[in-house]
Amino acid sequence: MFFPRRDFLKFLAGWFGASQLPSGHTNAAPAPSILPEGSPQSTMHAAPEPPASIKAEFDVIVVGGGISGTACAIAAARNGAKVALVHERSMLGGNSSSEVRLYPEGNDAHAPWIRESGIHDEFHVEDRVRNHVFYREGLMNCHWDLVLYEWCIREKNLTLMLNTHMHRVTMASPTKIASIHCIQLGTEKTFDLSAANFVDCTGDGVLAYRAGAHYRWGKEAKSEYGESLAPDEATDKVMGNTLFFRAVDVGKPVKFVRPEWAAEYKDEKELSFRGHSNVEAGHWWIEIGEPHHPIHDNEIIRHEALRTLLGVWDHVKNKGDHGAENMALEFVGFWPYKREARRIIGDAVLTEQHVKSPQQLDDAVAYGCWGCDIHFPGGSLNRYTRPYIPPANANFEKFGTIPYGIGLKSLYSRNIENLMMAGRPISGSYVAFSSTRVLSTGCIVGQAVGTFAAACMQHKLSPRETAKQHAKAIQQTLLRQDCHIPGVENEDEKDLARQATATASSEAILSFGEGTTVRELTHPRAQLFPMSEDRIESVSLWLTSKAKDAVELTVGLRAAPCVWDFRSNDDLATAKTTVPPGHDGWVEFKFEQKVEPRKLYWVHTPVAKGVSWKSIAVPYEVSHATPPGAVAAQRMGPTRWEPHSTSVCMAIQVKPESKPFGPQNVIRGTHRPDKWSNIWISSNELPASLELKWEGAKKFNTVILTFDTNQGRRENAALFRYPDCVKDYDVEAQVSGEWKTVASIKDNYMRHREHRFDRVEAAKLRLKVLATNGAPAARVYEVRVYDEA
């Protein structure tokens, strides 16, 4: 029906001029319908009363379904808690989802043999097997979303609530949360959800803030914690937020016309210090910060970041030759990747000293090792200036960290008794936060907190009391479920494998190979290695010399408590020899030093002009080329050594021959090379077998195996399987003198496998490795055996 303008204005005046009554109804007559007469909806009805909130009770409620919240909810559910995961977006993953597209970069970029395991490894390995797209920022897609979704819905104890926004918190007392109130977009449903314990994984610390938890914002003054990287005066200026894009090559020229509202970058100077040679995806530096608040000004930041992104794309397409003529935008983010957050204060606060020079924590349940990565507050609004303080790989002396433990006391609120946190809001100073804030650290902290929350439920204790009384048990649960905690080893009395003797069909010896890449000794260099024997007679280095004269070189030998620790300044021995001019080959340094067997040692060289030490080129796709426990390092500053990633290995030979890959490693107590190589590697032939033998028969029904998906580095290739991982295998028990197959697996690519079967009684257990995903040898980190109800 068409209304004449005058009649329509009268209609509006009558409608909006009606006075509102307390009941919510008006004292005006019902407005006429503007639908045609006879329409089924032609009669106006009063708005229905909103439905009552749906009430539900859980053991644990996790708010926020980013990568930390997802891992947290899964871990709590796997450990017996009834869990709700409340997430306000349509897909899981938060900053890592296909909506935002920041990829969970591994800590292996900052330290060797430290890539995250546990649930994080499950996510990563499954995504690489399924995903046809390279793994980097801007390229995250639906396959990653689907992996996270699938991992949640298959947990019977987990209720997944997507599109569900938590808008209010009800307190049982000033120090205890009773419930949260949520509205679910698309269903018009509201929820009143209660639990014994809550976990804030919102990134912004929203749950904690609404519950009245103590928190910090911005940077503390240098004087507060004595931190060298903190500012002289406290400030609320923080890092900005980023939008990502993806572009594709469409095979023919594509024009791009910059919208008039977008920013403009006319020349390269306006993008100083902002590399943009990769035109397919990115960039992290399209970042908008000060003067905008990263939470309250999120919409302003999104618009400014979008202006910047389109301006950068205009520059790439139209301001010089960037190789983007055939490129077209396929994806532009509309939800910013957030870096900053409220930091919820716990009973302990991580600080710069802890992350740069760590000490063992009794309650450690996770770890971090990303460098202190502090961006300048303005981000892209400050043209011509650096977007960040030089990171650890540019100045390890100042910004580098050593893998450090994150303890339970930093993972619960000090004043809200049933509140825990994972991800960005954990308890730390601003400087420590600049290391812990990254996605992969958040994920393993999430698994630790989920396990922690399940323990609170099991013991019916608060997080504080659970941490005091059951930290060790939580650590042991995490180790069993494939998490790594620096300095913590398997002490599980129920693990029958710890009582066994291990033998194998063969074992590999330590071999580095000949050097291929020349690295001049313009600064000190080092190589760490595992030594199985009780003496080191000599170490040979592959050296080349361009010097005109012979060069006298003194090399030192030192002990290392773990693969990440090059802090020792004490030489066990030194050896001196002369490198002839024009030399290219092995040079032997004789130490004749007694050492403690089955420990890590390292040799280091001084600066030597004209002399180079060759390293081994490790092909990107052949991860098994680096011996576990081998680490190269360099010293750029006066005191601190920077470990290389495991793709760098200096060429050395050790006498006597070291055999660090024997079968006894699988029951040694840890499942990655940390204080030792900790892996069984067969000789280069398959099939190969590993056998556990007990003095008397044992009853058992569970075998847990940890294979090798190379925790030395994260592979980014599409449709990729880690070649080191065992693919086909049989698990057999010798029952009444006959071998019985209790598990037979084909086409495995996962690191952690648990097998449950009907209880058997046997004195021997055998793992037969039939094939790998590409490596020539079998590689197994750990075997556990249990008899469980």
Image: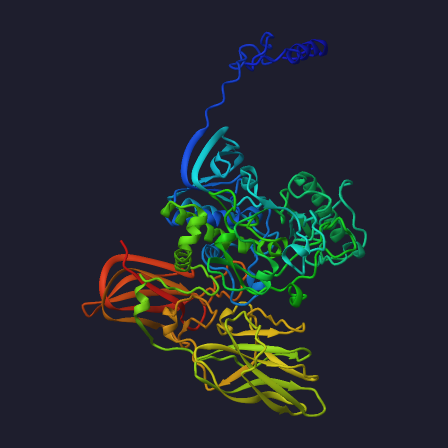
Q: Is residue 748 left or right of residue 166?
A: left
* Residue 422 or residue 546, whichever sits in front: 422
Report x, y in % for residue 377: 71, 50
Left or right: where 240 falls relative to 570: right
What's the residue at 47%, 69% (across, down)? 673
Residue 357: which quarter of the image?
bottom right
Can residue 13 be seen in the rendering of this structure? yes
State left or right for residue 274 relative to residue 677: right
The residue lying at 62 percent from left, 85 percent from top is: 543
Q: Which quarter shows the N terminus?
A: top right
Q: In the image shown, does 672 or 144 lie closer to the viewer?
A: 672
| Residue 581 x/y as whole percent | 68, 91
* Chosen colour scheme: rainbow
In the picture as drawn, the residue positioned furthest to the left comes out as 736
Furthest-front residue in this view = 223
Q: Is residue 180 something that shows in the picture?
A: no
Q: Position of residue 491 (x, y in %)?
A: 37, 64
Residue 645 point in image, percent of width and height = 57, 68
Left or right of 29, for residue 628: left
Q: Toward the viewer: 777 or 372?
A: 372
Q: Which of 406 and 390 lies nearest the eye of the viewer?
A: 406
**Total numbered circles:** 0
